[in-house]
Amino acid sequence: MTDEFFMREALSQAVAAGCLGEVPVGAVVVREGVIVGRGFNSPIGDSDPTAHAEVAALRDAARNLGNYRLPGCELFVTLEPCAMCAGAIMHSRIARVVYGARDPKTGVHASVLDLFAVDQLNHHTEIVGGVLADECGQLLSRFFAERRKAAKA
């Protein structure tokens, strides 16, 4: 299966978040071509600032695999990870992250800074950005446009 296939699965998680009024970001964790974890943003509904899509998918994968370390796993997420999520990704030993849209305000692969390139950190994750970037970005743009429109009404 391709990166686009798994990104579409992450997009379906993002749509679920949007339907709940959450910022539409979704993620899946894949090991050996099989999805082992799924998650979407839920900080509003869960009253939890750590309830990002990546963290939810990592937690789901860890429970399903019975290990807090996820070596050999890949994370597909619709938005460039933030600093908190980058830390969780590194601590879980994810081998590869594939993301869709860049996040010019909080992204830590290349948008604001690149935490994944810090040599002093003890784990390094391969990063691929821009997979289905237009679709991922449009989902976020529509969400925020609708939110601004509702606020004006």
Image (tube, rainbow, N blue to C red):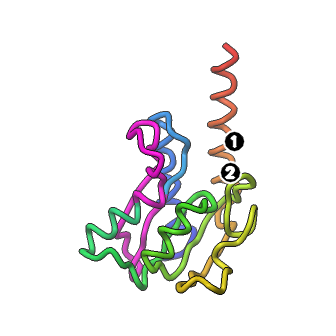
Q: Which mark is residue 141?
A: 1
Find residue 64 and report its horizontal and vertical position in percent: 26, 69
Q: Which mark is residue 14?
A: none
Q: Which corner quadrant holds the C terminus?
A: top right
* Secondary structure category for the residue under label 1: helix
Residue with the most extreme front position: 120
Q: Is residue 132 magenta?
A: no
Amino acid type indicated by mark 2: Gly
Find residue 132 and report its horizontal and vertical position in percent: 65, 62
Find residue 105 and report its horizontal and vertical position in percent: 72, 52
Specify few, some or many for label 2: CA neighbours under 10 Å numbering under 14, 14-19, or 20 or more: many
Q: Which residue is mark 2?
A: 137
Kindly indicate whether the residue at mark 1 contacts the one at mark 2 (C-beta within 8 angstroms): yes
**Horizontal relation, residue 60 to residue 19: left or right:** left
The residue under the point 39% across, 60% down is 38
Residue with the most extreme top position: 153
Residue 63 quadrant: bottom left
Q: Is residue 136 above or below residue 130?
A: above
Find residue 28 and report its horizontal and vertical position in percent: 44, 64
**Magenta span covers which residues?**
27-56
